[in-house]
Amino acid sequence: MTYKSDFLNILEERGFIHQCSDFEALDAKLMEDVQSAYIGFDATAQSLHVGNLTGIMMLYWFQQTGHKPITLMGGGTSKIGDPSFKDEQRKLLDDETIETNMKHIQETCFTQFLRYGDGENDAQMVNNNDWLSELRYLDFLRDYGRHFTVNRMIKFDSVVTRLERESPLSLLEFNYMVMQGYDFVELARRYGTILQMGGSDQWGNIINGVDLGHKSHQLKLYALTAPLLTTPDGKKMGKTENGAVWLNTDMLSPYDYYQYWRNVDDVMVGTLLRRFTILPMSEVKRLEALEGQEINEAKKILAFEATKLCHGETSAKEAESTAQKVFEQGSVGDDLPSIDIPKSDLEAGISALDLFVQTGLAASKGEVKRLIKGGGAKCNDNSIGAMDFIVNTSHLTDEGYVKLSAGKKKHALVKVA
């Protein structure tokens, strides 16, 4: 589909569009003048993660096409917690922790992608605690609560999932969708914001705000969501056996961030190049058409470009250089401790506990178990999450070896005899 606005055309071409409340009207509105759009982010940790990147990139392109992005931090709603698709109540945070988290997120995550300032289309970070903490409960119920029906709210997927699993859903969490809807109204009134964006799992919450704005103040607001990204096995992108893939260098090194993208599944490369790089689409289409061993070149470019966007070109070059030294340069690889294993043994599979001891990366199986438990044991830079992990020929790299790592500095190669 072709639009009049550059923003929607870019999102369409790069695979960001799933649903919109009114494509035609939003397209026309974006052609009038500078518009404001926002995405809400939790303040529950000191960093965002790869799962937040889709939203960040939507805001990036919004700013690049001349509009004003708003990063709404859930300083108020983080005290409650979004119940969406979670089986347990989220731990409640105090004000000091939330404030610290927000500061770290802006400094280490947002500023890598967005330009903040006082210009017409400069990004702005807003805290919803500024208005949520000032609400008078009875006044709020009278003015806004009457526009929400429990009949509709209990049909939302986030609520249905919890009820079907007979997981507790507190009144506190049930109010989250009301608070999120009210956020949209407040941003529209304070900043003229017309658009809320997010993942497809947030559609119900976003539409709440669109409806509330219309019913309470006759505002014309819009909703736009992107498809959720999942790995071929159905898991959410951005999760590993060792936890989240953080955007903050203090929580995940640029090298490990680079390796995350370098090791994605082949079938994901085209989609990830479109979403998480700013390469011209002509180059993206060339790379996603590569097949066989050539797809590894596309993965290297994906890893470099994604790391450059998040951590800067210098960090991306350093990560790329380190990866080349460890994996590709034979002279360096030969310097690493290595053992030769009969091909038949590797085909049958060998316990990681045994291999770590044989390569000298650990003195005993007990030490290996502690490494695994602490997330320090890796196979080809992917964390080994299970004590019964088996290494076999499927783990051989294109260069014909398996790389084992104990922490960030100790490595060894397993080669076929």
Image (cartoon, helix red, strand yellow):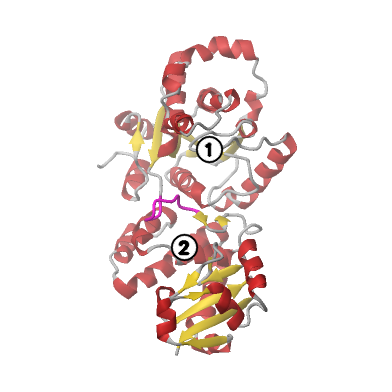
- Assess disc 2: are there few (<14), some (14-19) or many (≥20) residues with their C-alpha within 10 Å of its C-alpha: many
- Judging by the rendered image, the residue that carries numbered circle 1 is 87
Q: Crowdedness of circle 1 by 10 Å Cα count: few (<14), some, many (20+)?
A: some
Horizontally, residue 32 falls left or right of residue 37, namely: left
Disc 2 residue type (three-letter)? Trp
- Where residue 241 sits: x, y (%)? 53, 58
Q: Is residue 134 visible?
A: yes
- x 33%, y 66%: residue: 287
Residue for point 42% across, 44% down: 65
Percent position (x, y) of residue 353? 57, 73
Residue 194 in view here: no
Q: Is residue 237 located in the magenta-colored stretch of the structure?
A: yes
Q: Is residue 117 magenta?
A: no
Judged left or right of residue 284, residue 412 is: right
> If the image is split into quadrants, where does the C terminus sit?
bottom left
Above-or-below relation of 383 to 235? below
Q: Which residue is mark 2?
A: 261
Depth order, front residue of 245/1: 245
Secondary structure found at label 2: helix
* Point 51% across, 23% down: residue: 185
Residue occupying the point 57% across, 12% down:
141
Q: Give the foreground label among 1 and 2.
A: 1
Quarter of the image that includes the N terminus: top left
The stretch of residues the image draws in magenta is 230-238
Q: Are marks 1 and 2 in contact (CB under 8 Å)?
A: no
Main SS of the magenta part reads: loop
Q: How many marks?
A: 2
C-alpha separation, residue under disc 1 versus residue under disc 2: 29 Å
Is 253 placed left or right of 15 in the picture? right
Q: Position of residue 268 (x, y in %)?
A: 37, 59
